[in-house]
Image (spheres, rainbow, N blue to C red):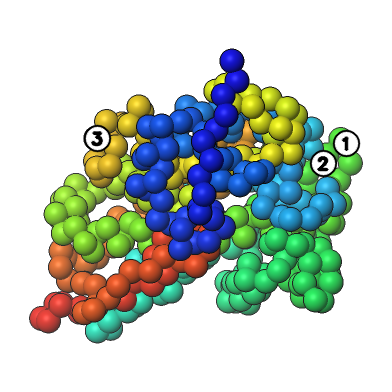
Amino acid sequence: MAAEAPEIAGIDLFDHRQSQNLDARTREWRAASPIVRLQPDLVYVARWQDCWEVLRDPARFGNANGFKRVEVPEEERMLGEMDPPRHPLLRRVMRSGFTRAAVAREQPFARARAERLLDAIAAKPGAELVGEFCDQLPNDVSLHMLGVPERDAAQIVCWAKELLHSDWPALNRTARGAGLAGAFPEFAAYLDGLVAARRAPGAPDDLIARLARSELGGAPLSPTVLRALAAHVILGGFSTSTNLLGSLLYRLLREPALHARLRARPALVAAAVEESLRLDPPVLFVLRNAMRDCELRGVPLAAGQRVAVGIASANRDERVFDDAESYRLDRGAPRHLSFSGGAHLCIGAGVARLVAREALRAFALRFEVGELALAPGFEVRGVPVFLENGPERLEVRRARGARG
């Protein structure tokens, strides 16, 4: 027998001041009902098993357009804005650049860059870790993997930040024009130039080169598709990896015993990254669309209704995780949903994990316990983005007498 989802008034998932402070409410939702209705056309799924059911069933719960509020031409969609049959074909193309071997090749660069950035921080009496480290390292690794020359990295980051803080993510346009090429012509032209250069004889074998050589249905990918995929690589992990590193370092600065443990046993760094992903996911929820009239755990959903998959809630589900609210390094294989799941499992998850492990290892070994401390009077504030989770800033000071 069909059941109605309880209606919850006064919750706006698209207001970061609310979406980043829902742990107590989602605990109640998990206990009371598999699904709650937040708006007439929006339901929230709170339990791990139900979230996983939505994520693994793209036929019932589609992802077309992602968070955009307008219809986007298929060729201009990024990977996370596609549904079958196009999505699995282009995902297969993208996977060629994110193999385990391709990710492993970035490890020496990621480690060296992390150590270099931390050396610069160690030479000063104070720093702002999000801007000087957590933001910088993932961007450097992503652009290096993509094949962007280091001399161009600062400009790419500038374009990316301008784009993410514009109307384009929601509307696929700005006052300058529609689509990436119309809204940000300089950025689009740069990406087009990278692709053209990789098609020349003797070009380096990097991610852009592999995309440029790929085919779809026996034909080369169009310039528009290649531009969208290249932008996806740059933008896809632009803020999420920053949030992951920010949450990791914020926890380390507040918990000296954890810092000491990782410094003594660097082999625990991987487990520390996974537990941070679980308790402090960089993305709080993802949206899906009911593709047809259907049911989820007996609750009827109408075609076109939006389904918020509560990643942050699922990761604390007491049915799945013992002592779910505690940060523990003995949980074994990760079961969190912080990289989504199913057909849309984050294609850059391997790179994000690599960067986080190298960042945490470098920080734990470079600084003694207590050598850096949160600045006097520091109060953490979350990033002002409704679906993201992480500190906006991390201001630290060196302890008196600390080594240089």
The residue sitting at 83% across, 48% down in the picture is 74
Q: Circles 2 and 1: CB distance less than 8 Å?
A: yes
Please, what secondary structure does the residue beneath circle 2 have? strand
Which callout, 3 or 1, points to the residue nearer the camera? 3
CA–CA distance in space, label 3 to label 1: 52 Å
For disc 1, the neighbor class at 10 Å (few under 14, some 14 to 19, many from 20) is: few
**Depicted 163 relative to depicted 75: above or below:** below
* Quadrant in the picture for the N terminus: top right
Which callout, 3 or 2, points to the residue nearer the camera? 3
Is residue 158 left or right of 256 when viewed as pictured?
right
Q: Amino acid at mark 1?
A: Gly
Q: Amino acid at mark 2?
A: Glu
In the image, residue 15 lies at what x, y percent? 53, 61
What is the residue that sits farthest to the bottom in this orientation?
125
* Quadrant in the picture for the C terminus: bottom left
In front here: 150 or 234?
A: 234
Query: Which numbered disc, 3 or 2, marks the residue that appears first in the sequence?
Result: 2
| Residue 218 disc label | 1
In the image, residue 164 lies at what x, y percent? 63, 67
Confirm whether residue 150 shows in the render: yes
Confirm whether residue 99 shows in the render: no
